[in-house]
Structure formats: C-alpha cells, structure tokens
C-alpha cells in the first residue's frame, strides 16, 4: 500500500510537469516575444494577424517598381518545426502551390549551398532564374538572392523568411522580398508580380502549410 501511495503522487507530479512543459518553446527557438517579432506592427495590425489576416507592410499600389523590400507578416497554423520543414527544407516544392510558377528544382552538386532553378510564366511571358539560399536553422531564418553565375531573366531578386514560435500549433512568419524584372521582360509584368501575384502567393503559402503540405494550387496536375 505504501508503494502504491508513493507511485501515485509521483505519476501525478510527472503528468503536471509534462503538461506544463508542453506549452513551452524549444530551447533556443525565436519566439513571438522576441524584440523583432512584431517590429513595425501596430496593436491593430497584431490583432488582424491573430484573426488570420495576412499583412503586407508596404503600400504596393505606389508604382510598379519597389524602392526597397516589400515586407509581410502572417501567422501559420502549424508548429515551427513543420513550418520550417515545408517552407525551408522543401523550398523546391513551391511549384505545387505558388501561382504562375511552372516548375522549380534543386540544382545538384552545389556542395553545401542550396540552389534552385525556377521557371515562371505570366501572361505568356516566360522567366527563368536561379536562386541561391542561405539557410540558418539555428535562427529559424533563411534568405535568398539570384545566383550571379546564371543567365537570369530577373534583374534583382532577394528575400527572406523569419519564423517565431507562438505555441505548439501557431508560428509567426515575417517575410520580405525585392525584385526587378530584366530588360527582356515587359514592364507590366513587374506591376502584376507586385500587385497581384505577391498577395496571392502568400495566401497560397498559408493554405499549403496549414494543410500540412497536402494542398495544391488550382490546375496543378503532376499528382505529387
């Protein structure tokens, strides 16, 4: 009887500790309490994020050419490890969910670098380019830029994703991008990419990640 008495409280205590730790962030993971997590956002903006809205933090209606990084924020309904897996580790899956992206594939034999080839088709205009990624798992952050050794149809492309743990089922994401089309691409494509494709792309990212990677864009026919 004494043994049962001792084991009982021990199990209760163990369960209590497990429950308490379940809501704690993994060691070293950036959280939504980090100083830069909600930087630049108003209380109203944060409330919109928590209500499920995607915030684009720069007025993209001001002309066709961005003068700097266009930034966005959104909350995904997945834990930070799943978000990292689907967005960073599977960056070559983007053709499955991004509009107008015909294909993307990892370039083999690039050593410790991650490079991905892209083919984008908008209104009959085809653009091919190669992106080089810098992946920093310890910071839950990665950024990218055009590979200067490739014959890119874009003049400039760079961007980043930063992730912040909120709880076991939600992740705050900060995104930035800056791009300019090359001389061989009509100017209207630049405006379309900024005003139409960017908001839709972020919406599709959210659908893809929230589904656990199973959602596919309309018209996707490759079956994977």
Image (cartoon, rainbow, N blue to C red):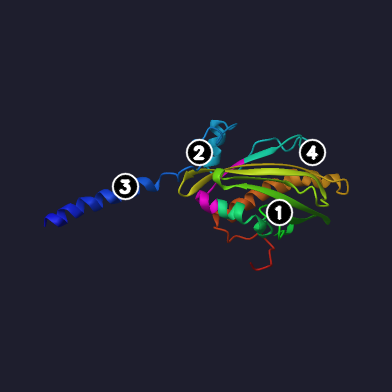
| Disc nearer the start of the sequence (1/3) | 3
| Disc nearer the start of the sequence (4/2) | 2
> Where is mark 2, residue-wise?
32
Query: On the picture, is 120 further left or further right than 51?
Result: right
| Residue in front for this viewpoint, 105 or 97 | 105
Assign a secondary structure to mark 2.
loop
Figure label count = 4
Query: Which labelled disc corresponds to residue 115?
Result: 1
State whether residue 11 appears in this view. yes
**Marks 3, 2: nearer the viewer:** 3
Quadrant in the picture for the N terminus: bottom left
**Marks 3, 4: nearer the viewer:** 3
* Span highlighted in magenta in the image: 73-83
> Where is mark 4, residue-wise?
65
- Measured in 3D between alpha carbons, the distance from the residue under mark 4 to the one under mark 2, in whole angstroms, is 32 Å
Q: Position of residue 162 (x, y in %)?
A: 59, 42
Residue most toward the right?
A: 184
Q: Is residue 7 magenta?
A: no
| Residue in front for this viewpoint, 150 or 100 | 150
State whether residue 123 appears in this view. no
- Measured in 3D between alpha carbons, the distance from the residue under mark 2 to the one under mark 1, in whole angstroms, is 30 Å
| Residue in front for this viewpoint, 147 or 95 | 147
Label 2, residues with CA under 10 Å away: few <14, some 14-19, many ≥20: some
The quarter of the displayed image where residue 115 is located? bottom right
């Amino acid at each position: 009887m004494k043994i049962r008495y001792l084991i009982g409280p021990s199990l209760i205590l163990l369960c209590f500790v497990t429950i308490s730790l379940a809501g704690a962030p993994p060691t070293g993971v950036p959280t939504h309490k980090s100083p830069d997590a909600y930087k630049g956002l108003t209380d109203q903006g944060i409330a919109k994020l928590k209500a499920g809205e995607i915030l684009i933090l720069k007025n993209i209606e001001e002309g066709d050419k961005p003068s700097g990084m266009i930034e966005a924020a959104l909350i995904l309904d997945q834990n930070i490890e799943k978000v990292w897996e689907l967005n960073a580790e599977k960056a070559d899956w983007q053709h499955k969910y991004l509009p107008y992206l015909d294909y993307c594939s990892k370039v083999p034999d690039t050593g410790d670098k991650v490079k991905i080839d892209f083919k984008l088709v908008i209104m009959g205009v085809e653009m091919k380019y190669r992106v080089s990624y810098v992946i920093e798992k310890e910071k839950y952050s990665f950024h990218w830029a055009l590979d200067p050794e490739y014959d890119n149809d874009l003049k400039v492309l760079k961007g980043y994703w930063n992730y912040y743990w909120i709880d076991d089922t939600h992740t705050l994401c900060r995104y930035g991008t800056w791009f300019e089309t090359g001389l061989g691409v009509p100017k209207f494509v630049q405006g379309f990419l900024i005003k139409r494709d960017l908001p839709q792309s972020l919406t599709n990212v959210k659908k893809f990640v929230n589904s656990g990677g199973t959602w596919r864009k309309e018209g996707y026919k490759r079956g994977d």
